[in-house]
Structure formats: structure tokens, C-alpha cells
Amino acid sequence: MRKQVQPERYWQEVVDLDAYAPPFNRNPSAWSQRVPISILASIATIIAGYMALFQWGLIPSIWDPIFGDGTESVLTSEAAQTMDRWLHVPDGAFGAWGYLSEAILGLAGSTRRWQYRPWMVILFGIDVIPLGGVSAILVLCQGFIIGAWCAPCLATALISFVLVFMAYDEVWASLKYLQRVWQHTHDKGLLWRVFWGYASTEADRLALQR
Amino acid sequence: MWGRVVEVMLGCWLVLSPFLFGHYPAPRPLWTSDLVCGGAIVLLALVSFWWWPIARFLRYAHVLILGVAFWLIGFGYFYGGYPASAGYQNDIFVGLILLLTAIIPNEASQPPPSWRRHYQRQTTAR
């Protein structure tokens, strides 16, 4: 890989990868913010995967400290079987994939990805905020529809809500950056290129402007 | 580069799965698909890793893994039918995970090449 890296070893001298993203006085793409998001999402992946193991019949029972048999009634309910017929895979396993996607998209990108890769931050935002939020609300409704409660399901729904609050500022910084680029240039082509991570002197000047 | 590493591991998993899930030697379309797709994933990920002796555009080879991922999901879902046996569900999940990794750029933890060149020009202009 030396051939690729060697001619561009000086770029780090002129760029601050920890710069604060307007309108915040912090860097929402910092590892200190993204690693906890990924750890929480991974915990939810493991919980959902544990429920999937039960739905696949690989483990005979499931541990629920609060509702006892509630989890097993939820996971074998009519609603869960309907989801299984639609998806061809257990809904627990599909949920595990959803949380895994939040963990993976949370880890990808540099600590200034709100500026350099808006597409990635916005994809992450769509994954965590509308999709994560709506699925968490559906999980909460399960208790009222099915008539049984499930502590591991509620734990993953809670994690979803926490992730929305942890992730929103990075998405907001990225959207505000794109908005500044648009308002100062009114150049659709430039906005498109900036969105997909192509460099621009004009966009770089606007990136840290408040 | 970690996206490519995960893809190579998933490709190897797919090559092993006919033997792990017991769908070798039948049904034949399933294990054929697993072996071909697994091989293609490993190949595309490695080409994306070692693009530089051949041609620059090859570093984007990992994007083609999206095509393999859609095939795996579609094959597992439609050909597998319902209820889908373990081998088909495995295809669906490997495909779903590949959808996530295939969009991760090489050197994902650094700014994109375009921005690095942009700042590089600033240092040489000084």
C-alpha cells in the first residue's frame, strides 16, 4: 500500500480532523462519540441475536428476568409468525441485522466525516433516526397488541431511542454543512459532488463557518 | 480496509457453508451459488485491496459486491421459498451483511482520496 500513501503524506499538516462542526462546540464525528454508539448497537445486536437463536430453535428457552414466559409468548406469537412468513427469516434475526447496520455505519469514516462523507453520515442518520425510531415504537406496541411483554425486546427498543439522541448531532452538522454550501453557491453540481465526498475549495471554506 | 477484511471472511464462510449446513451434494443450485458467490466476494475484495499494480479504478471493485449481495438475498428469498431451510436463510443474511460492508470505502478511517489530494496541493503550494 506504500505506493498509494507515500505521495500524499503531508495532507495531515493542513487539516484538523478534530475540528468542531458548526453549529456545535464539539466534534460530533469524534471517536469518543461514535465508538459508544457502536458498542450500544452491538449490545442490541447480541440481545436480538439471542432471541433469534430461540426462534430458530437452537436454544430451548429464553431468559427474561422481568416477565418470565412473556418473551417466549412474544417470540412465538401470531405477529412474529406473520413476520417470519414475510421475511423468510425470524424477526429477531432481522432486528439483529438492523442493529448491526447501525454499529457498522457508525464506525465507518474519518473523525471529520460530517464534512468529507455526508452520504455516509446521512445514510447512518436514516438508519438510526427514522428506521431505528419507528422500529422501537413498533416493539413498544407489541406489548399492547400481543398482550405479552418481553424484557429483551424492550431493552433493544430503549437502546434504539438512546441511539437516536446520540446520533442526531452528527447528522444535523452534516445537513447544516450541505445547507451552507447550497445557500452560498446555489450550485447543484457542487452540492452533488460535496455530498459524495469530492473536494471543493469553496465547500471547505464554508465547512467551519458559523 | 476493514470492510474488505470482513468481506473476505464472509466469502470464506459462504464457501464453507455447503459443508457446515449439509446442503452438499443436494440441492445443487444452492451449493453451486454458495461456492461461486463466495469465490467472487473474496476475489472482488482482494482486487479492491491490491488495485495498484493493475489499474486505479479497480479499487472500487468492492462496489460490485453489492450485486453479489442482491443475488444472495434474492436467491435465498425466492428460490428458497417458505419455510426457508438453514442454507437459504444463511444466504439471505450473508447478503444483508454484505450490503453494509460493500459500501464502506477502502481506507474508510481517512478522508476520501479527493479531499486528501486537495490538502496535499495546499502543502505543495506553500
Image (cartoon, rainbow, N blue to C red):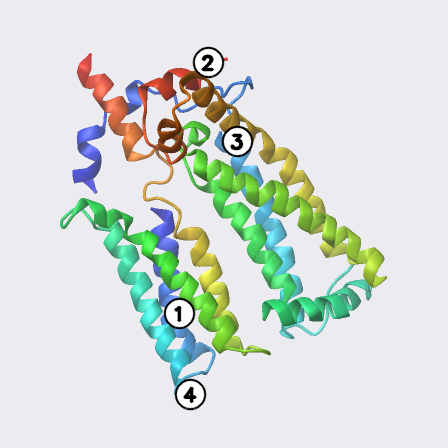
**How far apart, in angstroms, are the residues tagged by discs 2 and 1?**
48 Å
Label 2 residue SS? loop
The amino acid marked with disc number 4 is Ala
Residue mark closest to the camera, 3 vs 1: 1
The amino acid marked with disc number 3 is Ser
Location of the N terminus of chain A (image quadrant): top left
**x 41%, y 66%: residue:** B71
Q: Earlier in the sequence, mark 3 or mark 2?
A: 3
The amino acid marked with disc number 2 is Gln
Residue B46 place in picture, x, y as percent: 26, 56
**How far apart, in angstroms, are the residues tagged by discs 3 and 2?**
23 Å
Q: Which residue is mark 4?
A: B26
**How far apart, in angstroms, are the residues tagged by discs 4 and 3?**
49 Å
Q: Are marks 2 and 1 in contact (CB under 8 Å)?
A: no
Q: Are marks 3 and 1 in contact (CB under 8 Å)?
A: no
Q: Are marks 4 and 3 in contact (CB under 8 Å)?
A: no
Q: Chain of mark 1?
A: B
Label 3 residue SS? helix
Residue sticking out furthest to the bottom: B26
**How far apart, in angstroms, are the residues tagged by discs 4 and 2?**
62 Å
In front: A142, or B15?
Answer: A142
Q: Could you tell me how many numbered marks the image carries?
A: 4
User: Which picture quadrant has residue A17?
Assistant: top left
Q: Is residue A103 left or right of residue A19?
A: right
Label 1 residue SS? helix
Q: Are marks 4 and 2 on the same chain?
A: no
The amino acid marked with disc number 1 is Leu
Q: Are marks 4 and 3 on the same chain?
A: no
**x 74%, y 70%: residue:** A76
Residue A85 place in picture, x, y as percent: 64, 72
Residue mark closest to the camera, 4 vs 3: 4
Q: Which residue is mark 2?
A: A209
